[in-house]
Amino acid sequence: MAYPYAAALVGAFLYILQQGLMMNTGTYRGKAGIGVGFGDDRHLERKIRRHGNLAENAAIFIAVLALTEMLVGTGPIVIAFGTVFALARISHAFAFNSLGGSHEKIEGGRKYLLARMFGALFSGLTGIALSLFLIYSVIVRLA
């Protein structure tokens, strides 16, 4: 069995990103004087969703990446899956730096909307492709 080195590195990176988003949200929450929820503050709502969306997606991806890596070893395919997912999550987080990526059309909002679309699309596609690769790898091993 191989050790999941690539999954460990991607997981560590995503956790640092997650903590950065959490601290950014908490700092803004304190300045806005909102203890729970987001009130009517769309900036806080966006920050909460940016943090939450990463939490919703990263953990299961890292688990599947680690299982894949333990089964097939650390190689270019595993590294590519981890890299594309990490870049997609950076793109998604960047998009939510502006209301243009989430709530409304504003000056320069198109680049944020495109970054959000890229991040969401490639997060999903990478996760599905990785899962299919894992299923294939298991079937080949069992055959």
Image: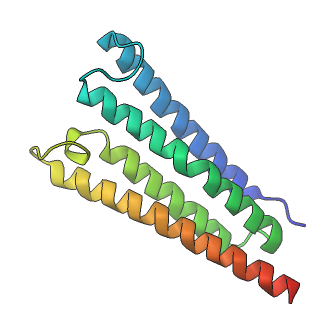
Q: Is residue 32 above or below residue 82?
A: above
Quarter of the rendering containing residue 28: top left
At horizontal 80% and vertical 87% (from top left) the residue drawn is 140
Residue 32, position as x, y percentages in the image: 30, 13
Color encoding of the figure: rainbow
Residue at x 46%, y 45% (from the top left corner):
53
* Residue nearest the observer in this picture, 128 or 94: 128
Q: Residue 143, relative to residue 54: is it above or below?
A: below
Residue, far left: 107
Q: In this view, which residue lies farthest toward the right?
A: 1
Disc tally is 0
Q: Is residue 78 left or right of residue 85?
A: right
Name the quarter where the C terminus is drawn.
bottom right
Q: Is residue 69 left or right of residue 82?
A: right
Residue shown at 54% from the left, 42% from the top:
55
Q: Residue furthest top?
A: 33
Q: Residue at x 74, y 59 (%)?
A: 66
Residue 131 is situated, as x and y percent measured from the top left of the image, at: 63, 70
Residue 61 percent location from the top left of the image: 61, 57
Q: Nearer the viewer, residue 135 or 123?
A: 135
- Residue 78 vs residue 120, the one in the foreground: 120
Q: Image height check: is 53 above or below 134? A: above
Based on the displayed image, in which of its 4 quarters is residue 63 positioned? bottom right
Q: Quadrant of the N terminus?
A: bottom right
- The x and y percentages for residue 80 are 58, 69
Q: Is residue 78 left or right of residue 19?
A: right
